[in-house]
Image (cartoon, helix red, strand yellow):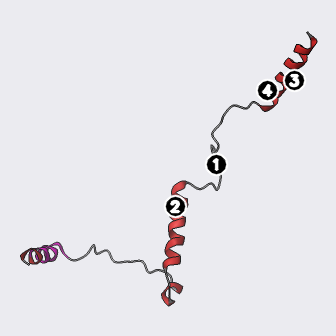
Amino acid sequence: MPQIGYVAAILACYLVLTWRPRRAQHAGGGEGALTVWQLVAHVEAERRERERVGRHRLREPVESTSDDAGPPLELQQRVLDGLRRL
């Protein structure tokens, strides 16, 4: 009978030391943690940078400062009408 007590005590110690409730692996990322979308944007920016070749890659990209959305709607309609007639 004492052998059953020893086995039970060893098993109890093993379970106490090794059993942990399952928790989310990445819960509470904390300060400085990146989201998936930030990582995707970072990878895309690196990919675009690698695609740039030649001397123009040394310059900073020029962002458009104009507020124009394109040619006037009337001109766009006339172009579309002309293309339909072809």
Mark 1–mark 2 distance (CA, rounded to whole Å): 17 Å
Which quadrant is the N terminus positioned in?
A: top right
Q: Is residue 9 above or below residue 80?
A: above
Nearer to us: label 2 or label 3: 3
What residue did someone put label 3 on? Answer: 10
- Sequence-wise, the earlier of marks 4 and 1 is 4
Task: Please identify the quarter of the rendering in which residue 32 is found.
Answer: bottom right
Span of residues in magenta: 72-81
Q: Secondary structure at mark 2?
A: helix
Q: Nearer the viewer, mark 3 or mark 1?
A: 3
Q: Which residue is mark 2?
A: 40
Question: Mark 4 vs mark 2: which is more N-terminal?
Answer: 4
Which residue is tagged 1? 29
The local secondary structure at tag 3 comes to helix
Q: Amino acid at mark 1?
A: Gly
Q: Is 36 drawn above or below residue 79 in the view shown? A: above
